[in-house]
Image: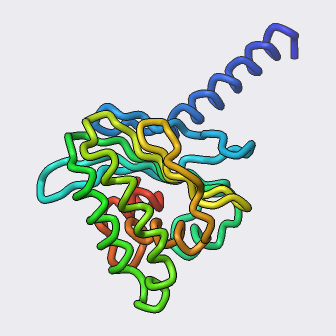
Amino acid sequence: MSRFYRAAWLALGAAVLAGSALAESVTLAGVTYTDAVELHGRPLLLNGAGIRYKVALQVYTAGLYLENKAHATPAVTALQGPKRLSMTMLREIDSRELGRLFAHGIEENMDKTAFSKIIPSMVRMSQIFSDHKNLQAGDMLVIDWLPGIGTVIAVKGKAQGEPFTEPAFFQALLGIWLGEHPADSKLKEALLGQVG
């Protein structure tokens, strides 16, 4: 094979690979979730992304990033590396109401004994939402799990206080979207990459 044809095949192969990587990015309601991000020095893949609806209204988009793809909640929970859930608001939201909905979602997906152990973290999380009052369309809320450090909640690109150190708190947060009683079952399927 001549150098010309070899170069042409290599270029075509590179273009196909680049195209497939780009194809894994997802755009929802004008919000793009890239196919990969770096967190805590490690690459994470977009596991899935979807839109949270309440009645017929679009509330926010959400994307789940993991080190390895996982299509069931126990598989997500079992992964030991960093994880990210990123949300972008699609409308103005009273953040205190959003905080109440988060708390309700956590409580719905935990037994009372487990829930009682994370009450201090729940109080801290409620304060974060109270401090922000309103979130506007386009505002981002990011929840990161960093092994050895804890859960970091960032609002509008700024980390909110010290990390939440209990691993159970991050799992409780994930339960809002991936638990047995998710906030939105279609969003759960999307985050788990179960919809094509």
Residue nearer the viewer, 161 or 106:
161
Q: Is residue 82 left or right of residue 58?
A: right
Asked if residue 10 is positioned above or below residue 43 in the image, the reply reads above
The structure's colour scheme is rainbow
- The residue at the point 44 percent across, 57 percent down is 191
Q: Is residue 68 left or right of residue 121?
A: right
Quadrant of the image occupied by residue 97: bottom left
Asked if residue 18 is positioned above or below residue 173 in the image, the reply reads above
Asked if residue 45 is positioned above or below residue 10 in the image, the reply reads below
- The residue at the point 66 percent across, 44 percent down is 39
Q: Is residue 47 left or right of residue 190?
A: right
Q: Quadrant where the N terminus lies? A: top right
Residue nearer the viewer, 49 or 136:
136
Q: Is residue 77 left or right of residue 180?
A: right
- The residue at the point 62 percent across, 28 percent down is 18
Question: Residue 115, image x and y in percent?
Answer: 44, 83
Question: Residue 48, image x and y in percent?
Answer: 47, 52
Quadrant of the image occupied by residue 80: bottom right
Say how many tags the image has: 0
Question: Residue 99, image x and y in percent?
Answer: 31, 60
Question: Extreme left residue here?
Answer: 56
Question: Residue 22, image x and y in percent?
Answer: 54, 31
- The residue at the point 21 percent across, 40 percent down is 91
Quadrant of the image occupied by residue 19: top right
